[in-house]
Image (cartoon, rainbow, N blue to C red):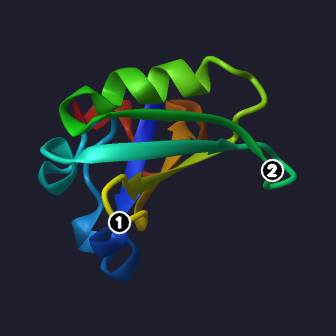
Amino acid sequence: MHFRIRDLAAERCVWSVPPIDTVPVKLRCRMLDVRAFDVHDKMVGQALGEGGKLTDVIRQLFADRHARYLHVHFATDDAYAARVDRFTFAASTTWCPSLF
């Protein structure tokens, strides 16, 4: 299971999109509240965790097949920090195996 995190900088500038399966530095050292949403935009799960363990939290929430995407909030002030989407290489139009 792969994921892509789009933080606020990534939503404003395409050059800020972090690589696949990578947690942006600014999320690694904060307490985070991660919420899972289904295809109807209803919350289906929630987890609280340190930013350094965000990858584990993402994998835990995406283990639920109903979870379509995740929202990451800073736990201290509930401010929105990022969106996490499932990522499959087959669905990507920019990935080319011949380049690697």
Residue drawn 33% across the image and 27% down it: 55
**How many marks can you see?**
2
Viewer-proximal residue among 8 and 18: 8
Residue 1 appears anywhere in the view: no
Q: Examine the rendered structure and indicate whether residue 25 appears above or below residue 56.
A: below
Q: Examine the rendered structure and indicate whether residue 92 appears above or below residue 21.
A: below
Residue matched to label 2: 42
Residue drawn 36% across the image and 20% down it: 56
Residue 73 appears anywhere in the view: yes
Residue matched to label 1: 77
Q: Quadrant of residue 35?
A: top right
Q: On the picture, is 24 further left or further right than 84?
A: left
Identify which amino acid the numbered label 1 is placed on: Asp
Q: How far across and how far down the image is residue 34, in percent?
A: 48, 43
How many residues crowd mark 1 within 10 Å: few (<14), some (14–19), many (20+)?
Answer: few
Q: CA distance from mark 2 to mark 1?
A: 22 Å
Residue drawn 35% across the image and 82% down it: 12
Identify which amino acid the numbered label 2 is placed on: Lys
Q: What element does badge 1 sit on? A: loop
Work out which residue is located at the far bottom of the displayed protein and give it. Answer: 12
Q: How far across and how far down the image is residue 3, in percent?
A: 45, 36
How many residues crowd mark 2 within 10 Å: few (<14), some (14–19), many (20+)?
Answer: few
